[in-house]
C-alpha cells in the first residue's frame, strides 16, 4: 500500500482550512493548517494560520506564525506585510515600517499593492502627508482595482490642495 503524497495531503488540508477560515470556523481552520504544516510545511500554511490567529485577536501568535513562514521561505512576501499589519493593530506603527518595506521587494509576492498601501497608512498616521500620498499612488498604480488606495490618495489630495 502506498502512502499519500505529503505535498498533496498538505495542499488538501490547506484548501479545506481556508474554506473553514472564510466560514468563520477558526479553531477548525487552525487545526487543518496545522495538519497541512505537519504533512509538508509551507510558508503559505504558516502565514494563513497566522492570519487565522489574527481573526481571533491573537496578534502575537499571528506574528510568530509569520516569522515561521519567513524561515520556510524568506522570498514569500505575504508574511512581511502581515507582520506589519498586525503591528499596526497593536498600535506599533513605527515597528511596522521595515516589514512593509521588506514586503515591497520580496521576490515572491503577487499583491505588492498591499504593503505600499499599508506604508501609506503608517505615514498618514505619522502626518507625513507626502510619503503617504506617494505610497497610496504606488499602491493604486500596481492595482487599478484597489479602491482603498485611490480613496486614500484622493483624501490626501483634497485635504492639501
Image (tube, helix red, strand yellow):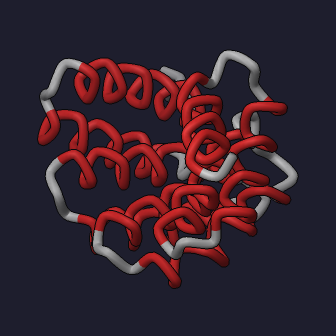
Relative horizontal placement of residue 15, taking residue 116 as reference (left or right): left
Residue 42 visible within the image: yes
- x and y percent of residue 67 in the render? 52, 72
Residue 71 visible within the image: no
Write the residue at 46% across / 53% down.
Answer: 46
- x and y percent of residue 79 in the render? 56, 57
Q: Give the answer, above or below, for where 27 lies relative to 21.
A: below
- x and y percent of residue 159 in the render? 56, 48
Q: Give the answer, above or below, for where 2 lies relative to 131.
A: above
Relative horizontal placement of residue 70, taking residue 14 as reference (left or right): right
Location of residue 25 by image quarter: top left
Location of residue 70 by image quarter: bottom right
Write the residue at 73% across / 40% down.
Answer: 139
Relative to the observer, which residue lies in front, 9 or 32?
32
Relative to the observer, which residue lies in front, 115 or 157?
157
Residue at the farthest front position: 161
Relative to the observer, which residue lies in front, 41 or 137?
137
Relative horizontal placement of residue 40, taking residue 17 as reference (left or right): right
Location of residue 15 by image quarter: top left
> Count the marks: how many?
0
Write the residue at 23% across / 23% down.
Answer: 20
Write the residue at 81% across / 46% down.
Answer: 108
Amino acid at each position: 500500500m502506498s502512502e499519500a503524497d505529503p505535498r498533496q495531503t498538505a495542499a488538501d488540508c490547506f484548501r479545506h482550512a481556508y474554506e473553514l477560515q472564510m466560514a468563520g470556523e477558526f479553531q477548525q481552520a487552525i487545526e487543518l493548517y496545522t495538519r497541512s504544516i505537519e504533512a509538508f510545511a509551507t510558508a503559505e500554511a504558516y502565514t494563513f494560520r497566522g492570519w487565522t490567529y489574527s481573526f481571533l485577536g491573537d496578534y502575537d501568535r499571528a506574528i510568530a506564525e509569520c516569522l515561521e513562514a519567513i524561515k520556510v521561505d524568506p522570498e514569500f512576501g505575504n508574511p512581511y506585510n502581515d507582520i506589519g499589519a498586525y503591528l499596526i493593530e497593536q498600535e506599533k506603527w513605527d515597528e511596522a515600517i521595515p516589514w512593509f518595506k521588506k514586503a515591497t521587494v520580496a521576490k515572491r509576492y503577487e499583491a505588492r499593492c498591499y504593503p505600499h498601501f499599508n506604508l501609506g497608512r503608517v505615514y498618514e498616521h505619522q502626518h507625513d502627508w507626502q510619503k503617504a500620498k506617494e505610497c497610496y499612488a504606488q499602491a493604486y498604480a500596481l492595482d487599478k482595482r484597489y479602491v482603498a488606495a485611490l480613496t486614500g490618495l484622493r483624501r490626501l489630495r483634497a485635504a492639501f490642495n
